[in-house]
Image (cartoon, grey):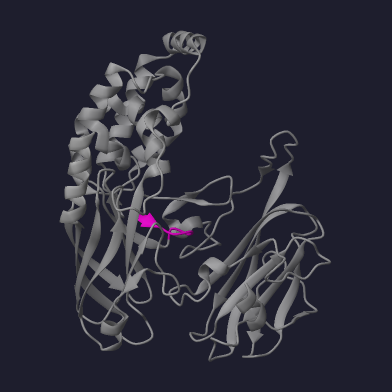
Amino acid sequence: SMFLCCALASAVVGAVDLQPNRTLEVLVPIGSDSQAFHFHCNRRPANVLVELKVHTLDADPLLLLSTNSRVTPSVETNDGTSLSQWRDTAADKHYVLAREVGPDGGIVVVSNLRRFSTQRLNGELTLVCSYIAAFDLLFFNHVTESPLCPVGDGSIGRGEWCSGNGRCRDDLSCKCRSDFIGDACESKKEDMLLVDEARFSVDLPAGKYKYFRVRIPEEFAGGYLSVQVNATGPVVVLGRVGALPTKAQFDNSNFDDWVSRKNSSEFVIPICGTEGGCSDVVPSDEDAQEEVPADQWERSSRRAQECSEAEVHSCEDSCVSCMLCVPSATNPCDSCEVCELCLPKLEQCRPVQCDSPEAESCRKRCGKCAVCVDSNDASCAMCGQCSDCVAWITQCEAAREDSEAKYVFVGLLNHDRYYDDQMTAVAQLQLVESPELVGARERVGLLG
């Protein structure tokens, strides 16, 4: 924050307001004052999206937003920023979202960070409003006239939120299809969740990331992820534990190879395991499970008797179909949305005791399948016989997986400033356990 504060210039409020259905041209020279604009949604309360489409490659834009029409936002004090897209030239659209903006609107600041930019910022600023039709004063889940989410590679005019690769949620975030990832579902993704080694052949359009998500098994003692990439031209390869890597944030990269214009790269990403001395403390099963009153199980059992078996089986079948589905442009895996919508009903109709003999049977047969509910890993085909365990997967295992799962992300980027418009690449990923740590784990097991 201190560095950004020093890099930002003071903001001068423009004379023209930013309003819906009106595009404002933005020109911010290097080292000049930032530009600020009042905005409002036709003097009505609304959730808002302010988007900046950048036409110059070497500018370095940052958006800051205030929902108070009398307060100019700063790095230290604001109600929203485009910081997640900052310094990422793979994105030509920068945006900021804000909820429950009042009739007077607010102020948005457009900056061209002078330490990094080598070109005047030239772009277009647009405002999209989702008007609040009714206020929910109890739960603050206000009713809006239309959805509102990051647009990414989609079109505002056609209502293509989330780059057309996901759907818009009430909290203004995107729920991506399982083969896409990112705040705006703008990047393709491949999963490696159930195997230790996989080989992927991918296309790399100019200026776009391609991501791989690798799940670290719970029993992994510690070691590294080996990354090998061979491409038709030099590509940027980035790795990061626990979050998506970008050119600004990563744990390891092939920067030297890329600068040397090499088409092949190889590096490793160290990964701590449960016996590696640097993992988080994971609560035991006894700590993680709350004791459920006996009468609650009785009430749940009565509710289950009122449920339609046909509805339950239909939901289970949809969730299994979602696990098996590998999405594509012609197959969006509609069963995944059906599964997500019917899960509350399934939980009501099929309450599960996570420490029961039935749950233990599901754990042995289908324990790995919890990661397949929202995945495009072809290895999930092994979960086809798990329809009777869907309730256990979603109520017991998926919740634990969400809180304890550990992932490593690898990103490939065809940097559009230097090389071909289109490239292809082969990525070989292998998860390798350290023999020393495996031995230590086995010795602990013998002592236990």
Residue nearer the viewer, 433 or 276 = 276
Q: Which quarter of the rendering shows the C terminus? A: top left
Residue at figure coordinates x 34%, y 77% from the top left: 206
Q: Is residue 198 left or right of residue 111?
A: left
Residue nearer the viewer, 179 or 409 = 409
Q: Quadrant of residue 364?
A: top left
From the top left corner, tell me how far across and down residue 257 is, in percent.
26, 83
From the top left corner, tell me how far across and down residue 383 is, in percent.
22, 35
Q: Is residue 92 left or right of residue 241?
A: right
- Count how many numbered circles sit on residues in the image: 0
Residue nearer the viewer, 419 or 192 = 192
From the top left corner, tell me how far across and down residue 204 is, in percent.
29, 71
From the top left corner, tell me how far across and down residue 200 is, in percent.
19, 62
Residue at figure coordinates x 38%, y 63% from the top left: 187
107 in magenta: no
Highlighted magenta segment, given as a residue range: 179-185
Q: Magenta segment, principal secondary structure?
A: loop
Any part of residue 396 in sight: yes
